[in-house]
Image (spheres, grey):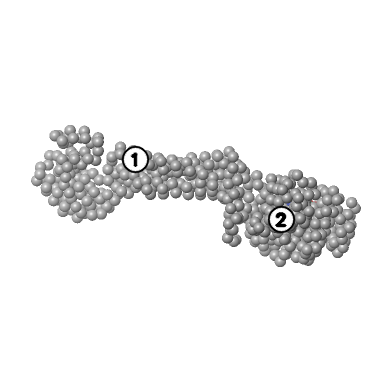
């Protein structure tokens, strides 16, 4: 626009845009439906990917190693192993926990279900362990290799294994998800641009007259941009509602059932809000994009 | 107000509608464009408000060189020109009042000015009592007057009419000519393509005759010069 738009002009464009939405009936419903389906998938996909990435990040920055000690090792040997580990360059701290400590920790982490583990108090199957912290996260993997070779070490557990598997999955999921979403986004854009094409056809006379009495191109285009914007925003309403309630219940119920060390979901606030905002923005962009396309193609102003 | 230098127009289908057009029309003139069908009258008129661009030559309208005029400036050129169409081009779902107000909303006039001015032009074309009617409730002559009202509502410097009386009965035609005379007497340049011998020979003005895309006659207070 050459000059700042006057308030009454903004009002006029909004009124026209809303009118167009109602005028197009089923095409409007179809476009909003397409945006809705697209955004539902976008929201689900992003919720999964972002949470997995979050977990992966967390594990990656986890500098802890768990060194399980052979059950056959005696107290001296355990002590000696501890000293040797402490002598390694990359080690920051070493903390011992007996097999009883390990069991108590396990029972505690399992909550209600953990109670059945109390039966094992007499005949504890767990290994005593050292929890070792590396000085920096990058050293976790080589350090694990070093410790594995020490005597009386049964096994060294650390996050990297899980992370690598998670990353493999993420890579795969991202590609599949993105292809799906890009396809859906374009379908939605296509439907919206067709809906707006209908408006443009219905209004070709009006547009012609507007041009002849000196309406600027911007003035003619605005109602169509608003129509597209509204289609996109309306299409994001259901996905946002589903996302908000869905994530709320996910956090409330699922998180209590799953008790893996790295399983931690992003908190509702701000994650669900931010994702909703993103979904809204994607909806708006799809809508405006669709209208820009049809305005360019069918409105040679 | 309007100057054409060596204008020619060849359409994309190869038809040359105008060639070697040199003309100067001053502010406040009233000009009839006459000539047989297909002579190039409508093409001549469409050049003025930049509906078509010339193939060669220079055209200046209201101090704007149209060959140098940027696409986004065209709307501002058109605000200086009111166009009256043979087929009226009214919006069927809007009332007479709304049809005229529409032309003012488009250029973002204030509602207060719109109300005042629309009633003013409806008065001028003698249709104040039809303000709330829809176009299809009006006769052809009345609809043509509405399209005139819309053409002049934004105080254009130039009013162009392409065969405005083509389909109207003589009485209505004279009524429309009265309105044009009135607008012209207030200083608006008026250009009108017509086939009406009676009008041209009765209300004397400058006559530009076009045949096969060339100006063959240009006379002040001229005659129609064709039969029928
Ligand atoms: N848009 C167009 N495309 C191609 N040829 C056209 C177009 N408009 C007019 N013509 C041709 O140009 C010539 C002049 O037409 P026009 O300017 O409409 O004459 P008039 O208005 O005097 O009848 C005619 O031969 C007509 O067929
Ligand atoms: Mg013609």
Cβ of mark 2 under 8 Å from ligand 2: the answer is: no
Q: Which dot, 1 or 2, sits closer to the camera? A: 2
Residue beneath disc 2? B118
Can residue B45 be seen in this snapshot?
no
Relative height, residue A34 to residue A143 (above, below): above
Question: What residue did someone put label 1 on?
Answer: A252
Residue B191 at what x, y percent from top left?
79, 59
- Can you give x and y, in whole percent of width and height, for residue A90 in the image? 21, 54
Seen at 77% across and 52% down, the residue is B127
**Residue A272 in picture, x, y percent from top left:** 40, 46
* Image: B168 above or below B222: above
Instruction: Determine which of the numbered discs, if any, sits on residue B166 in the image.
Output: none
Closest to the observer: B129 or A180? B129
Observer-nearest of B77 and B119: B119
> Residue A155 location, x and y as percent?
20, 42
- As rendered, which of B134 and A211 lies closer to the eye? B134
| Quarter-of-image position of residue B59 | bottom right
Query: Quick check: do tags 1 and 2 share a chain?
Result: no
Camera-nearest residue between B188 and A67: B188
As drawn, the residue found furthest toward the front would be: B129
Compute the Cα span from label 1 to label 2.
64 Å
Chain bearing mark 1: A
């Amino acid at each position: 626009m050459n000059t700042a738009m006057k308030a009454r002009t903004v009002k006029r464009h909004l009124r026209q845009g809303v009118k167009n939405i109602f005028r197009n009936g089923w095409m409007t419903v179809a476009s909003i439906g397409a945006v809705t389906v697209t955004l539902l998938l976008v929201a689900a996909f992003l919720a999964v990917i972002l949470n997995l990435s979050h977990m992966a990040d967390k594990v990656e920055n986890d500098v802890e190693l768990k060194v399980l000690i052979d059950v056959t090792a005696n107290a001296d040997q355990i002590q000696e192993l501890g000293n040797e580990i402490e002598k390694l360059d990359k080690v920051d701290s070493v903390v011992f926990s007996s097999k009883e400590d390990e069991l108590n920790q396990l029972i505690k982490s399992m909550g209600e279900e953990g109670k059945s583990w109390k039966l094992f108090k007499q005949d504890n199957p767990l290994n005593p362990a050292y929890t070792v912290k590396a000085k920096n996260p990058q050293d976790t993997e080589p350090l694990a290799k070093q410790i594995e070779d020490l005597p009386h070490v049964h096994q060294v557990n650390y996050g990297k294994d899980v992370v690598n598997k998670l990353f493999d999955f993420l890579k795969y999921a991202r590609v599949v998800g993105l292809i799906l979403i890009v396809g859906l986004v374009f379908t939605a854009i296509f439907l919206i641009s067709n809906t707006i094409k209908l408006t443009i056809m219905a209004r070709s006379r009006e547009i012609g007259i507007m041009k002849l009495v000196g309406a600027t191109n911007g003035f003619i285009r605005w109602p169509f941009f608003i129509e597209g914007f509204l289609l996109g925003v309306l299409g994001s309403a259901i996905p946002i509602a589903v996302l908000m309630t869905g994530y709320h219940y996910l956090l409330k119920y699922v998180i209590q059932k799953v008790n893996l060390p790295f399983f931690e979901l992003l908190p509702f606030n701000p994650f669900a809000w931010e994702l909703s905002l993103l979904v809204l923005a994607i909806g708006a962009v799809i809508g405006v994009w669709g209208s820009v396309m049809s305005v360019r193609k069918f409105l040679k102003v | 107000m309007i100057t054409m230098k060596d204008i020619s127009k060849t359409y994309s289908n190869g038809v040359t509608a105008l060639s070697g057009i040199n003309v100067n029309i001053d502010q406040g003139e009233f000009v009839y464009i006459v000539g047989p069908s297909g002579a190039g009258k409508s093409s001549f008129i469409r050049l003025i408000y930049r509906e078509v661009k010339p193939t060669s030559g220079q055209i200046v309208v209201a101090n704007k060189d149209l060959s140098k005029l940027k696409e986004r400036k065209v709307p501002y050129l058109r605000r200086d020109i009111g166009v009256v169409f043979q087929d009226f081009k009214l919006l069927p779902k809007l009332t007479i009042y709304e049809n005229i107000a529409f032309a003012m909303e488009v250029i973002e006039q204030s509602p207060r000015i719109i109300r005042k001015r629309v009633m003013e032009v409806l008065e001028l074309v003698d249709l104040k009592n039809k303000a709330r009617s829809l176009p299809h409730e009006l006769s052809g002559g009345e609809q043509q007057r509405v399209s005139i009202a819309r053409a002049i509502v934004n105080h254009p410097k130039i009013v162009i009419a392409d065969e405005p009386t083509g389909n109207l009965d003589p009485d209505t035609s004279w009524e429309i000519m009265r309105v044009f005379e009135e607008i012209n007497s207030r200083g608006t340049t008026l250009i009108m393509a017509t086939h009406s011998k009676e009008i041209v020979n009765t209300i004397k003005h400058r006559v530009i005759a076009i045949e096969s895309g060339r100006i063959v006659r240009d006379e002040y207070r001229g005659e129609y010069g064709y039969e029928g």
